[in-house]
Amino acid sequence: MTHSLHVNAPAGLPYIDTERDFDAPVPAVFDAHRDPEKLKRWMGPDDLSVEIPELDFTTHGGWRMVHRDADGNEYAFHGTFHTVRENDLAVQTFEFDGAPDQVSLEFLTFTDLGDGRTRLSAHAVYPSLEARDAMVASGMETGMTEGYRKLDDLLAGAVAR
């Protein structure tokens, strides 16, 4: 079953909340965020490839990923994990290289819904309403929807990349 992504970007407030359910247990969803080989298989929109030169999914660890389109254009992102609690929470910074100094702080929460299901909730706070609006306008929702569909496939064991 494919679940819908819910996005809430309230007018006048510099944050975005997202929520998505998965038909897989919390440890599997958490591991798909921690393992760079798994993350490469699902992260981002369908029309971009992804490289993950750095992923230390631990408290005080760092990360970097680079998306590429068919023409070779790169879209690079990086951040730091401030807190990672096994199968529960990840707090990280998120910065697009193309918009330096527009750092968001993101809280990812992994909730056990029972029956082998997980709810992934995110709360991302931006330094300004303009930065938040730029993220919304960037196609973030489409990229997340496509990525989470690939994550569903990965969790079901169906991805063969």
Image (cartoon, rainbow, N blue to C red):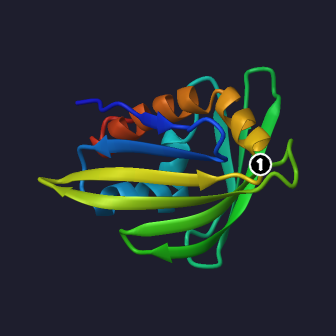
Mark yes or no: residue 135 visible.
Answer: yes
Residue 102 coordinates in the image, percent (x, y): 81, 51
In which quadrant of the rendered image does the N terminus lie? Answer: top left
Q: Which amino acid, mark 1?
A: Ser
Position of 25 compared to 110: left or right? left
Numbered disc total: 1
Picture quadrant where residue 47 is located = top right
Q: Tell which of 39 and 22 is nearer to you.
A: 22
Residue 5 shown left or right of residue 123 in the figure: left
Residue at image location 48% in from the left, 59% down from the top:
108
Above or below 114: residue 20: above
* Position of residue 86 in the picture relative to residue 50 (left or right): left
Residue at 74% of width from left, 49% of height from top?
77
- Quadrant for residue 127, please give it: bottom right
Task: Identify the residue at image location x=17%, y=54%.
Answer: 116
Residue 59 spot, x, y in % from top left = 58, 78
Task: Identify whether 61 is placed above or below 139.
Answer: below
In this view, which residue lies farthest toward the left? Answer: 115
x and y percentages locating residue 146 in the rendered image:
49, 29
Q: Is residue 9 above or below residue 33?
A: above
Q: Position of residue 154 (x, y in %)?
A: 36, 42
User: Which of 82/63 is in front?
Assistant: 82
Q: Is residue 70 above or below residue 40?
A: above
Q: Is any atom of residue 160 visible in this view?
A: no
Residue at 56 percent of width and 38 percent of height: 10
**Label 1: which residue?**
128
Badge 1 element: loop
Sort mark 1 into few (<14), some (14-19) or many (20+) by Cα contacts within 10 Å: some
Question: For this rendering, which residue is in front, 156 or 99?
Answer: 99
